[in-house]
Amino acid sequence: MTYDITVIGSGPGGYVAAIRCAQLGFKTALIEKYNTLGGTCLNVGCIPSKALLDSTEHYHNAQTTFAEHGIKLTGVKADLGQMIKRKGEVVSQTTQGIDFLMKKNKIDVLQGLGSFVDKNTIKISGEKEQTITTDKVIIATGSKPSSLPFIKLDKKRVITSTEALQLKEIPKHLVIIGGGVIGLELGSVYARLGAKVSVVEYMDSLIPTMDTTMGRELKKVLKKLGFEYYLKHKVTEVKGTAKTVTVKAENTKGETVEIKGDYCLVAVGRKPYTEGLGLENIGIATDKAGRIEVDGQLQTNVPNIYAIGDVIKGAMLAHKAEEEGVFVAETIAGQKPHIHYNLIPAVVYTWPEVAAVGYTEQQLKEQGRAYKTGSFPYRALGRARASMDIEGLVKVLADKETDEILGVHIIGARAADMIASAVTAMEYRASAEDVARMSHAHPTYMEAVKEACLAATENRAIHM
Ligand code: FAD
Ligand code: NAD
């Protein structure tokens, strides 16, 4: 078979790229080595983790806040098996949705491992082996969990996120290496179910790449959930036996702590995945971190081949991969798309959620940019008190002279959905006063964004 465009990898980058290619009239193939489409995000990432986060949040609320709402329950029990089963159903409904979209858009799905024979020929090794020719290729092969050189991942006691999404029992004591997004999201799942959770983090704060206020606030809230922390600790040894794990970590003074648990989740980041792709057969360049090198058009050093998503530089986020998929399809079609990378939002789906867009305060300081800050606490919102979600705040950073919004950082209920309005405002280069003068429905959490903008404008928040 011969195609105009072949996409390798069916994650959010790959399947979205394939759909946009088909919409633009290209004869398109999508190659995926697994039996189900959707990649990391749909199968072992975004979707299953959110399914477990939602189930455990209901369980947690049933135990902690329902009584005050006047709902009396007795004998509330967590059924982990049912939670995992429901998660599996959510995943299969979602991946089947991608099968439907492929058929609807007349995209040929070829199951098997795709590898380059030459720059226009790809061999697919699956149940049946086949070779196709193609004019252009979009590589969207994503990423895999990374680890530390001295850790032996036995995938039973010393595990990655993939295994943590399908445990058969609630850990008694889960030791997590890495206080980033995966560690805190999956740590929340098991802490809500009653596990003791210890986080060992190399840096001096949780979610260290986000604004420091967010890490500080999240640390306080998760502590109430039972998290304990070993910040500024470097892991030096991890040992797993049939039923236990022992993690040794060293602090900045050279002192060693030993943490004993029954599971250890290694969540120290992810690495680009290019194994078996045959990049060496066509001379595609990768950087030191193993990422495929691309230019501003997301084109590799082989001109008919593009790469997107987790396998290239930038944030490892599903929506970043999706934007890049659309970008490449439109670029190949001769259009002039644009991605504003600084306005790709980041969300941590703990409760309360953390969401951010634009620059952090640390980044503005490093740039030497004159800025002003406005903050507003959730506890001052009527809406937050009505729902008993009073923890959190909105922090707005704006240019000191022009008042243009440079960053919005939210920790609080529904932050994940609220951040979209900050993205909209910043895409249109709104000033803090622009947002502050717009009507926001009452009572809503979004009023905290308006108030934080008022605070940034001239320290004129109304309800504080
Ligand atoms: P992937 O989704 O990794 O897909 C790549 C696909 O390519 C895979 O299906 C793979 O099998 C296939 N493949 C690889 N090599 C070949 C080959 N040679 N031939 C054929 N097929 C191949 N991001 C968010 O934005 N929000 C979240 O809430 C979120 N939660 C996450 C939770 C967890 C636990 C994890 C692990 C990740 C999460 N992420 C989240 C990150 C998100 O999953 C990734 O950023 C996203 O999946 C990247 O998309 P991608 O298309 O680049 O690659
Ligand atoms: P991460 O980069 O978010 O966090 C890894 C953490 O591990 C960092 O804080 C880092 O300082 C720490 N660390 C690294 N080496 C260490 C060591 N030796 N000892 C102790 N700590 C160490 O990575 P992650 O949590 O594994 O997630 C991987 C990727 O998946 C991220 O890039 C993220 O964007 C994506 N993801 C996104 C979401 C979301 O959008 N909600 C959810 C899950 C995963």
Image (cartoon, grey):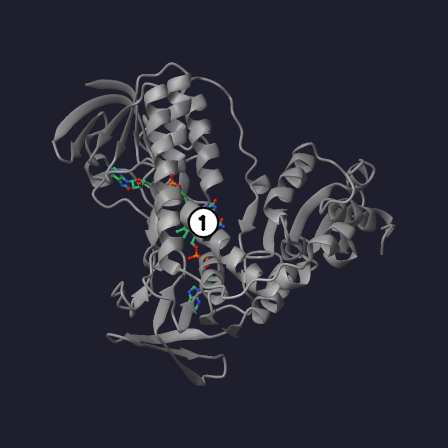
- Seen in the image, is 322 located left or right of residue 413? left
- Residue 313 occupies quadrant: top left
Looking at the image, which residue is at 51% across and 74% down? 228
- Residue 133: tell me if it is visible: yes
- Residue 243 occupies quadrant: bottom left
Look at the image and tell me in which quarter the N terminus lies. Answer: top left
Other residues around mark 1 within 10 Å, as few (<14) / some (14–19) / many (≥20): many
- Can you give x and y, in whole percent of width and height, for residue 221 in the image? 61, 66
Look at the image and tell me in which quarter the C terminus lies. Answer: bottom right
- Can you give x and y, in whole percent of width and height, for residue 44 in the image? 36, 48
The number of discs equals 1
- Seen in the image, is 355 located left or right of residue 401? left
Residue tagged 1: 51
- Can you give x and y, in whole percent of width and height, for residue 450 in the image? 78, 44
- Can you give x and y, in whole percent of width and height, for residue 376 in the image? 76, 54
Name the residue type under label 1: Ala
Farthest residue toward the left? 128
Q: Nearer the viewer, residue 354 or 455?
A: 354
